[in-house]
Image: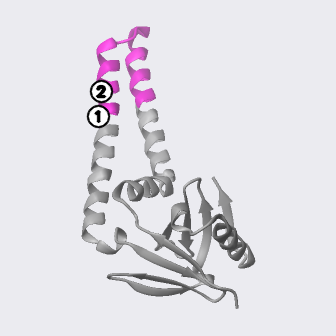
Amino acid sequence: MEEPVIINSQLSFDDYQTIVKFTSQKARGVFFILMVGLLLLLVYLTVAKNNEPNETMAWIAFFYIMSNIVFYSAFTRNRLKKTYDKIKAIGEPKVYEFNELLIAVTAQTLSTTNHWTNVKKVIERPSYFLMFSSGGHWFYYLPVTGFTSDAEIERFRSLIKSKGIKYNIK
């Protein structure tokens, strides 16, 4: 059996927030579409009255949309910060060990193993990898800086591909 691939990782709050936003783009897309739809409806209603634009209503619609976007962003950040602070395992240093059979994760408050069959997909970004569970209940953040060498990164990619896991580069 080959030597395991070992990755050191620590997820900062900013990285956590970025990843959660990245993984929930569908929800943000729906929110954006609803807001644009509301804006178009309000503009239509203001223009339709006597075929003259009503500048006051247009500004009210614009203010409403922008305040909702700002509120949504602030609310999301606040909720994520509370979760990050409450669940200490999210931000503590972790060591991931990947071998042919299992994935082991150890940290100060966490020690767990998973089988490769529980991995749904891996996304490679320029500075990190994200590994998602098949149930969508967990993800592993694996920074490129946590690998000991470029050869380790290649071994990790090969291991993922040998398991037949969906693999995307973004």
Q: In this view, does 62 lie to the left or right of 44?
A: left
Classify 10 Å Cα crowding around label 1: few (below 14), some (14-19), many (20 and above): few
The quarter of the displayed image where residue 100 is located: bottom right
**Amino acid of disc 1:** Ser
Percent across and percent down for residue 12 are: 37, 60
Q: Judge whether 103 appears above or below 166 on screen.
A: below
Residue placed at 74% from the left, 77% from the top?
162
Classify 10 Å Cα crowding around label 2: few (below 14), some (14-19), many (20 and above): few
Front residue of this view, candidates 82 and 91: 91
Front residue of this view, candidates 159 and 145: 145
Q: Does the magenta stretch include residue 56?
A: yes
For the residue labelled by badge 2, is the local secondary structure a helix, a strand or a loop?
A: helix
- Image marks 1 and 2: residues in contact by CB distance under 8 Å: yes
Please report the bounds of the magenta region as a residue range: 39-67
Residue placed at 44% from the left, 22% from the top?
44
Residue highlighted by disc 2: 63
Q: Is residue 17 left or right of residue 143?
A: left
